[in-house]
Image (tube, rainbow, N blue to C red):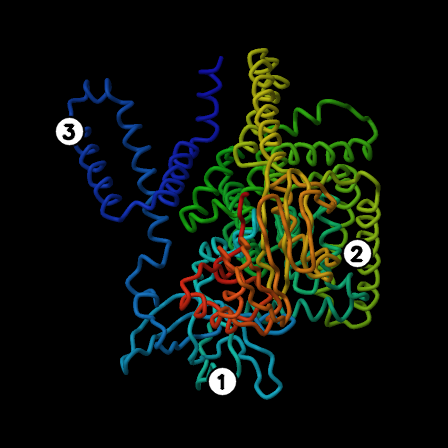
Amino acid sequence: MAKAYKIYIWKKAPFLRLLLPLIAGIILEFYFKFPIFIISFAFSALVLAYIIFRILPLAYRFKLRSFLGIIVTLFMIDTGSFITWHKDIRHQSYWYGEYYDSTSIIIATVSEPPLEKNKSYKAIATVGAIIKKNSIYSAKGKLLLYFAKDSLQNHPQYGDRILLRKKLTRIKNSGNPSAFDYERYCAFQQIFHQCNLKKNDWVLLKGKEVTAYNQVIFKTRQGIINALNKYITGRQEASLANALLIGYKVDLDKDLVQAYTNAGVVHLIAISGLHLALIYASLLWVTARIPFIKRFKIIRLVLVLLCLWFFSLLTGASASVLRSAVMFSFIATGITFDKRSSIYNSLASSAFILLCYDPFMLWDVGFQLSYLAVAGIVIVQPFIYNWFYFSNKLLNETWKLAAVTLSAQVFTLPICIYYFHQLPVMFLLSNIIAIPLSTVALWGCIVLVFVSPLHLVALYLGKGVSASIWLLNHIVLLVNALPFSLWDRISLSVTGAILLYIVFIFFLYWLIKKNMAAFKLGVLSSLTLAGMIALEKWHLSHQEKIIVYNVPTHKAIDFVDGNRYQFVGDDDLARDGLLQNFHLKPGRISLMLNNKEENVSTLYRHNNFYQFHNKRILIVDSAVVYIPMAEKMYVDYIIISKNPKIFISKLAAVFNCNMYIFDASNSLWKIDKWKKGCEELHLQFYSVPEQGAFVTDL
């Protein structure tokens, strides 16, 4: 039976034979970083092995036919390694990093409309040339630029060429425990450096470098935003309409986004397969009613694909959108030429194409969730749908939607817990209500954009769309406000997520195939997972840590004793939920700390002196003068915070300190002065904004 099922899978999705080794090659290259000569040598060896196999007599080739499969598998692994190596621009001779040093001047082009932030304008720029020692070197690469807001100088626009005269800084993580890996996120987009620019750090050059394609995309995008903002009343309603239709989230209220996340419907404001399916269905409906296009299948196919891909690029071409676009392209092509393909094979082939285009998509959360959700719907939804039968059409359609939601949730649950540390308990209810409402709102937004030149029609339609979005928002907020609507602060490691998937797979196989062996393996896997979590909890219940967080312009320290912690830091940071969620909460969840701060009995304080277990800590956050004594006072750590006017030499005359720690509330220029003072006296120091959060186990 197992062998028959294996053959069935390969026949239904033959592309899996290519996809799985390709993924293996991508992972191997990413983690082990094989040099190109090893990849090339492996390629040459495989080609030679294939040639030898082909020249063998037919009888030997038949006996060794499995050898050909091994060659193809190894070749795909090698291909995955090569495309991963090649995609990294740092391996190319034209990368700007090959020429750049601190004395270089950079010529770059702003490659997208800048986004307005609180204190700056953020933009991505492409490097065109490096000026170094009176020589100009042609170069390529992307930079992340922040232009300070200045009333005397406008920020650059898309296509502007600028000359940068400030040193680039490498993009680094905050180093906070379990925090978002921003450095890796930017590296996957081939961005490795950033620069904060004031008015004297850059010069606008003559001429623009724009492409017709980008101009059309950006102008269309801005036109849609203007139309929706004009006719949809209410700031939250208009911002959500922009997110629903084209994925524009700049103006979205963060608390509203959090409510959608907690209710389990955040996928509605992230352009996904649902949006592409509606666009695809509308394109088929429209083209089927135009006589000339309807008669010519090829013209209809080209028109549908052009519109589908234009919309995908318009929304930012996220991984989930690209997955849907590739899949619908396959489906549309198959229908046109009367060729039907297995959905499993379409999934595998679309993933194969996208990973060949960008192997780093494999680590994209949207890519992972998109494929897992569709796989869950395809595999599990028919089984769940057959649990109940309703003769009433409305009840049947509601149950069908519920079955789709449940099947998608089952396959995405472990990875959602791993990334987001929470489980929306009311996801089924919220999706059953929100998906139809969001579909109505999305259709309304599409029609509104097209009728926007007709002011009176657009005005009344805009009111209707506003009402539907208002209702959607308030239902989501209501679900979010329900008690026990969210199971929060769940800690799950990569190993735990993999084990949870194994548990689900065994139990699903048991339920679908009635296989008792799968049930036993599911129970064994569940016990293994429970034992691993219990062991981790026991280990963390005995932890003792001091964490100095890297939160720009803020003092933030946690004293951790077992599952309890006591926070010492800025009051506004303790009150700001968004800052806490981004900087502090991930680490506290991973360490399985209690939800609320508690007074730690092993922490004693006298003025700015702290005793925590056997460690003595002094926090200097103001200009104070310590009088030298006959014998220096011993402290383990001196944490300097809030830019105090102090000198390391004067502190060293009073205290015998193992480590000076400069937190992220200090200015970098002051930290540089203190670092020099430490170096002159041969004292150990740690700069949190430069080296990341300081974490020590006692």
Relative height, residue 168 to residue 188 (above, below): below
Which of 372/314 is in front? 372
Q: Amino acid at mark 1?
A: Asn
Q: Residues within 10 Å of mark 1 (few under 14, many from 20)?
A: few
Q: Can residue 121 be seen?
A: yes
Looking at the image, which residue is at 24% across and 43% down?
A: 38
* Labelled pair 1, 3 in contact (Cβ < 8 Å): no
Image coordinates for residue 637, horizontal then vertical, percent: 54, 55
In the rendered image, the quadrant that contains the C terminus is: top right
Mark number, residue 200:
1
Q: Amino acid at mark 3?
A: Ile
Relative height, residue 478 to residue 660 (above, below): above
Q: Can residue 112 be seen?
A: no
Q: Which residue is mark 3?
A: 55
Image coordinates for residue 280, horizontal then vertical, percent: 61, 49
Looking at the image, which residue is at 73% across and 47% down?
A: 597
Q: Residues within 10 Å of mark 3 (few under 14, many from 20)?
A: few
Image coordinates for residue 607, horizontal then vertical, percent: 69, 60
Q: Earlier in the sequence, mark 1 or mark 2?
A: 1
Mark number, residue 469:
2
Q: For residue 424, which quarter of the picture?
A: top right
| Secondary structure category for the residue under label 3 | helix
Q: For residue 456, which quarter of the picture?
A: bottom right
Q: Is residue 497 left or right of residue 603?
A: left
